[in-house]
Image (cartoon, coloured by chain):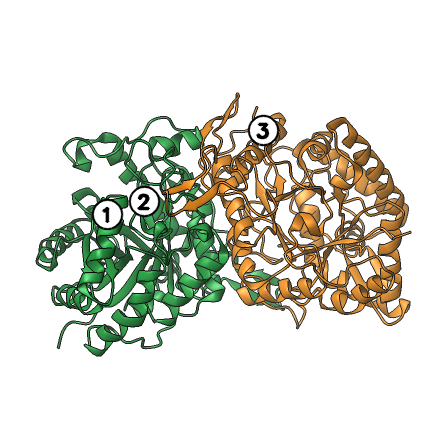
Chain colours: A orange, B green
Amino acid sequence: MTRRQIHLAAHFPGVNNTTVWTDPDAGSQIDFDSFAYFARTAERGLFDYLFLAEGLRLREHRGQLHDLDVAGRPNTLAILSALAAATEHIGLVGTLNTTFNEPYELARQLGTLDLLSNGRAGWNAVTSSDAFHGANFRRGGYLDHADRYVRAAEFASLSKALWSSWRDDAVVADAETGAFLREDAIARVRHESRLFDVDAVFDVPRSPQGRPVIVQAGDSPDGRDFATEHADVIFSLHTEFADAQQFYRDVKGRLAAHGRDEDSLKILPAVTFVLGDTAEEARERSREIALAQVRPQTAITYLEQIWNRDLSGYDADGPLPEVEPDTGVETAQGFAGRHAAIRARVSQLRAQADAEHLSIRELVIRLTAKHTFVGTPEHVASEIDRYVQERATDGFTVVGHVTPHGLDEFADRVVPLLQERGSYRRSYDEGATLHDLLGLPPVADRVAVS
Amino acid sequence: MPDRIHLAVALDGAGWHPAAWREATARPTELTSPAYWRDLARTADGAGLLLATIEDALSLGGRSVEPDAETRRDRARGRLDAVLLASFLAPVTRRLGLVPTATTTHPEPFHLATGLQTLDHASRGRAGVRLVAGSTPQERANFGRRSEGPTGLPASGRVEDDPALLAAFREVGEVADVIRRLADSWEDDAIVRDLTSGKFLDRDRVHKVSFEGEFFSVTGASIVPRSPQGQPLITALAHQTVPYRFAAQHADLVFVTPSDAAAVGGIRNELAEASDAVREIDEPLRVFADLLVLVEDTPDEAAAVWARLEERAALTTDARVVVGTADDLVEEIRALADAAVDGVRLRPARLPADLDAIVDRVVPRAAAAGILFPDDGAPTLRERLGLPRRASRYARQEVGA
């Protein structure tokens, strides 16, 4: 019986406190050399794809730019295109918003990336509705919250129609007769709805993998519906084993309704890791890293984003503030979490801190810097394999904590152990697309247009 | 001693002649492949050309004025997004300036600006852009957001006689302005990584652009820290008064299309007048003359190839056409250099054939004739053009305060 194969994605560390910029080995988060180094390490580790988040606006805290954590990153599509030239095999997946882009242009850009990378492109489709990010864009904050996934689903359908509008053999380029294109080479794509009025002829040929891989990251019911209809990969946050198994069963169980089988959607939760030669050493390193990720000021700032108040007078090593949160106006911008849920969130945090006797800093470490897999390379490899063999996930999206070297140890020490177990590839197949690497079914030749 | 100039190349599909893809030297099935573009860019890079522009449009028929541009099957079709293609070419080239074309009507100025800043980081200071005003009806149908817009040049041929075209030029002006503002929004030393205070960023050195225009607004600072050139090189192609004024106001470099070397003086005068009136940048506007070129070993061969191409499809062009030998082309370049242009942008009729001819035969001869600026090793595209690195406007304000 062959073992279920592990799929791994490599998350370039983002702009938040998981990235330890104070580490003496921390390099630039913007120089191309950092991205090239990281991509080559992921490729050395035979990862399925490199994953990049997106910035639409610099994060703010109480009306001012957030200045404690890493800030500043490249344009997602442009850096992935540059990486297409610096790599050969690894998939290149970027987060791109369906609210502040237009389908023709984004499909064209992703189609370009897919051709430039010989079929290695992917799209983490996310939604947004808030006026804070919208203030940088033509549309502003126009989209009702309830319409986020309506637009996202129509955006994905329309994009798929554009990507499949060219026949694979559209270009004949017959110099003798002068026919460059086949007669029915390109289908016109129409999409009329409340949100779109597109009558398009696409200008990017079909790529070797048919279309980019689609990744989905939201966890709401709308998000799960979108994923089971449109996505090839879910980037989930369910990392506790039992919870992960439950999520896995729920999502995979929804696929049949869309005529899809279990292998057509991969679930790759985000995980962190800390290695040591012994379990004790790994625990110590994990502790040191967590303290570097959540410095006292970082912990206070984190709470200020939830409380929406100046909490600078509080001791990070002391108990949670007794003062109530300010829910009057929304100013903690650029962070996840909605204003309406603030009070419930505060009660929940107080309960957790009381139950586990946590200081502010310890609580924030639990929330943002608790490392998923901590131990010897053997332990981490065995855990990763267990999750996959026992259908809690199809693999993981691995996030390191130092730029750009955060993946080195994983590639060097964990990957060989996964290979020994027979659960992980020993080389890339020549010419494999990202669909191939992920073991996804082939893309249908033409997609019907609504 | 002639005036020295720069040489640039304009890359587009199988070349600028619509029948170029049918030539035996063409690679018509590879026009959207990475290998094809890597080869073209490395060829231009290896020859020391100053920059390569990459054409783009947001519809299948491109900027063609032919009514059946989207349905005819005898033209090379299929295109890659030029900003992303330029980004792909950054790691595989060393010296070449990368100047993608960007349409300004539909794309988000914020995305375009951060894409160009990223290109500047990835190329270590070789990023530029050619901004194109307006959109075609086909482009508008592809986006479905704005039904109103230009339908082509009015009967008079003058931009100022069409309110929709005038609006398009106001909009491209806003886009140029926002690209520069966002590029300036991080001061050079905004990232402090100060272990004592625990601050990664000095928030006082990152500035909101707070741009409110007629067509869009952009609030925040860029997401991208300041790039090697400070600002990407902004360029435009211009043929008449309104675009000349746009270039004079907003561009670092303008591509013009003199009918011959004698026509350069009049164009330069008009650009100088416009610059006196509206220029917002303290460096001079660089002027490059465009030539559409086909190069063969003998005049007879060149004429025969040209005749074959024209028999298959008639070229419509805005630029002077030079069909001849490498020596003929060097003479044309010399005449333009004597007419005091800053550079010549060559549009190869056929790719890769005429690019190869330019690199193998034209560049060495022009260099030997002393027409070309030698590569002095200046690290960025702006500096190779003799333009200083742009300081952040926000930093300057603080100094003056």
**Looking at the picture, which amino acid does disc 2 mark?**
Val
What label sits on residue A304 in the rendered view?
none
How many residues crowd mark 2 within 10 Å: few (<14), some (14–19), many (20+)?
Answer: many
Of the pair A203 and B57, the residue shown nearer to us:
A203
Q: Secondary structure at mark 3?
A: helix
Q: Is residue A157 visible?
A: yes
The chain to which mark 1 is attached is B
Of the pair B310 and A198, the residue shown nearer to us:
B310
Residue at 46% in and 37% down: A202
Residue B74 % position (x, y): 36, 40
Circle 2 residue: B132
Q: Secondary structure at mark 2?
A: strand
Task: Using the numbered discs, state the Cα–Cα distance from disc 2 to disc 1 in whole angstroms.
Answer: 28 Å
Residue A166 % position (x, y): 51, 37
Residue A97 % position (x, y): 57, 40
Q: Is residue A429 left or right of residue A318?
A: left
Circle 3 residue: A154
**Looking at the picture, which amino acid does disc 1 mark?**
Glu
**Looking at the picture, which amino acid does disc 3 mark?**
Glu
Circle 1 residue: B310
Residue at 74% in and 40% down: A265
Name the quadrant containing residue A272. Answer: bottom right
- On the same chain, marks 3 and 2? The answer is no
Q: Is residue A392 above or below residue B338?
A: above
The chain to which mark 3 is attached is A
How many residues crowd mark 1 within 10 Å: few (<14), some (14–19), many (20+)?
Answer: some
Name the quadrant containing residue A41. Answer: bottom right
Residue B314 % position (x, y): 24, 43
User: Which tag is nearer the camera, tag 2 or tag 1?
Assistant: 1
The chain to which mark 2 is attached is B
